[in-house]
Amino acid sequence: MATNVLAGAATATGGPGDGRRRGGRGVRANENIAGWLFVAPVIVILGLFLLLPILMALWVSLTDWNGQGSPFTSQVPFVGTDNYTRLFTEDGLDRRDFMTAIRNNIYYVALVVPTQTVLALGLALVVNNRLLKGKSFFRTAFYFPSVTSSVAISVVFLFLFANSGAVNGLLRMFGISGPQWFADSRGVLHLLLGVVGVDSPPAALTQGGPLGLTWWEWLSGPSVAMMSIISLVVWTTSGTFMLMFLAALQNVPVTLEEASTLDGASRWQRFRHVTLPMIKPTTFLVLTLGLIGSWQVFDQVYVMSQGDPAKTTVTPAYLSYRTAFRDFDYGSGAAISFVLFLIIIVLTLVQRRVMADRDPDRPRWGRRRRRVSEGAAK
Amino acid sequence: MTALADRPATPTRRRGDRGARTLASRFLGYAILVFFSLVFLYPFVIQIGNSLKTEPDAAANPLSPIPDQVVLDGFVRIFTGTNFPVWLGNSLLVTLVATTGRVFFCSLAGYALARLRFRGRSGLFAAVIAVMAVPGVVLLIPKFLVLNQLGIYNSYAGLIVPLLADAAGVFIMKQFFESIPVSVEEAARIDGASIFRTYWSVVLPMAKPALITLTILSFQGTWNEFPHSLVSVQDPNLFTLPRGLADLVSGSLGKGTQYPLKLGAALLATIPVAIIFVFFQRYFVRDANEGADKG
C-alpha cells in the first residue's frame, strides 16, 4: 500500500526525475515497458486510421487530386486554400451547393434538437410516474429503435413514407391527401407562407442575399422530403435521450417534490421550479449531444434520398462524400469535411467546458480524480 | 383501483377530487405510454407484416400488419436473387473479428491507463478523450485515403482492421478498472506474477460486467456500421449487410419497388441486434440507469 501511495504522488508531480526513481522500484520496474506494450495496439490502430488520415486529408484538401494514383506525388496540383475559399467567397456552384447543405442542416438541427429533447423529457416524465406500472416494458419499447441499424430502419421508413405508404394511408384516414414525400422539394416555410396567401416570393427577397443564396432560398425551411428524414431521426434518437432523462429524474429526491407539494405548489410549478432545475445538467447534455449528433447526419440521407429532391436533403456530411466519391473532386470534398469538423469540434468544446464547470466532481482529463484519491490516501 | 373504491366513501370533497384527479392522470399517463409504444413499435410490426405480403398487397394495404395471404416469396428471393448470403457471411466475419479485437485491445489499453505507471500516461489518456470527439462522418475521405495508400482498400483487411479499436471502449474499460480494488492484483504481483499474467488471470475475471458491456456495444456498433464499409470496399463480394441493403435500395434490384423483399432483408439485418437487446438490455442501459430503482 505504501508503494502505491508513493507512486501515486510521483505521477501526480510528474517530473522526469520522479520517473527515473520510479523506474528503479522493484515490483514496478517494468511498468514503463508493459504500459506502452499494453496501449500499443490501440495507439497503432487509432494513429493509423484516425490521426494519420486526418493529416493526409488536410493535405489533400489543399490539392486538386482527382483520385488517380497517389495524392502525395509532385504531379498532383497544389492549390493552396482555393478549395476553402471557393466554399465561402467565390460565387459559383460549389458555394451554392455548400451553402444549401448548410441551410438544410440548420433547419434539420432546428427541428430535430428541440423535438427530440422535449419528446424525450416528456416520455421520461410519464415513465417515471410512480403511479404507473409496466415501466420496464415502455422503457424498452421507446429505446429499441435506437439500437437498430440506421440503414435497416431507413429502409422501413422509405416504405412508410412511400407515395402509397403507411403515413399517407394514415393521413387519408383523416381526409388528408399526403405529399409525395421524397419527390417534394418545397420548403415547409414557403408552404406555410402559401397558406397565408404569399404564393410568390416578394421581389425584395429574390434580389441578392448572403453567401450565394437569395434570402428567399435561405428562408425556405426544411423541404417536405427533409421532414421525413427529420421524423425518422427524432424517432430513433428520442429513446436514448429519454433514458438519460429518466436516470436524472430518478436522482431527484422524492422528499423535495413532496415538500414542494405540501407548500402548495401546483404540478406545473413543481416541474418548473423543482424538477427542471434539478435535471439541468442532463438537459444541457442532451441538448449538446443532439447538436453535435445532428451535424453528422449521413446514413439516412445516403439511403433515403441521396440528397434529392433538388438538393434539399443534402447535408455537409453527404456533400463531402458526394463531391469526393461521385464527382472525384477529393480536394473540395476534404475541405468540406474540415469545415464540418470545425463546426462539430467547436460544439464539442463548448459542451465539455460547460459540463466541466457544472459538475466539479467529474474527472476532467483524468487528473482531478487522482488528486482526490491521493488526498484520501494521505 | 383503490382510488375508485375510495371515492364514494370519502368524507370530504377535497379527497374525492384528488382521487378523481389521480385516476384521470393515471389514465392519461397510460394513454400517452400506449400511444408512443405504438409510434415506436408499430413500424416494426408493419415491417414484419409487409415482408410476408405479395407486392401488390403491400402497395395496397401498407398500414395493415396482416397479409392477405402469407407468402415467403420475398424471403426466397432474398436468398436466391440477391447477394444477401455473401453480405451476411461478411457481416458475421467482420463483427466477430472486430468485436474480439476491440474487447481485447481496449481492455489492455484501459488497464494500462488505469493501473500501470508509465511515462506519458496522462498525455495518452488526454489523447484518447480528444479522439473520442472526432466525428466519424468527417473521416470518410481520410479513411479512404489511408486505406488506399496502405494498399488495403477493397480488402477484408481494410474492412476489419480500422474497426479493431475505439477510444470510447478504452475509456469505458479504464473507468471500470479504476473502480475495482487494487489489493488483489497487488497480492498477485507481490507473489511474482508478471504484469500480463496479473491482467489476464486476476483482473480480467473481475471485469466481466465491463467486458460484457463492451462486447455488446462493439457487436452492435460493428454489425450496424455503414459509413466505414462505404469507403473501405467497392467489390460487391466484400459488402457487409448494411452496405448490401443500401445497395438494394439504390436500385440494384431492377424492376418494381419490391418492398416485401427490402423489408424482409432489413428485418433479417435487425434480428441479431434485437435478440441481443432483449437478452442483455441491462447492459445497453447500464450507464444511463445507474442507481435506478427496479421498474
Image (cartoon, rainbow, N blue to C red):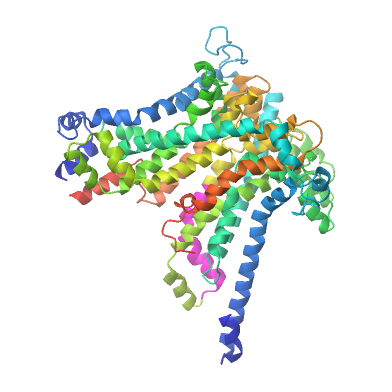
Front-most of residues A191 and B174:
B174
Front-most of residues A152 and A21:
A152
* Side of A175 where A335 appears, left or right: left
* Side of A183 where A131 appears, left or right: left
Tell me which residue sits at (64%, 39%) in the image. A151
Front-most of residues B144 and B81:
B81
> Residue A12 in the image: x percent, y percent?
24, 39
> Quadrant location of residue B111?
top left
Is B37 within the magenta?
A: no
Question: Quadrant where the N terminus of chain B lies?
Answer: bottom right
Is A267 within the magenta?
A: yes
> Residue B250 in the image: x percent, y percent?
72, 32
* In the depicted structure, whether residue B287 falls above or below residue B162: below
Tell me which residue sits at (71%, 43%) in the image. B263
Front-most of residues A363 and B72:
B72
> Residue B234 in the image: x percent, y percent?
62, 23
Q: Residue A221, can we see it?
A: no
| Magenta span dominant secondary structure | helix
The stretch of residues the image draws in magenta is: A265-288
Q: How many marks?
A: 0
* Side of A185 where A87 appears, left or right: left
> Residue A63 in the image: x percent, y percent?
57, 15
Q: Residue A80, can we see it?
A: yes
Tell me which residue sits at (58%, 32%) in the image. B89
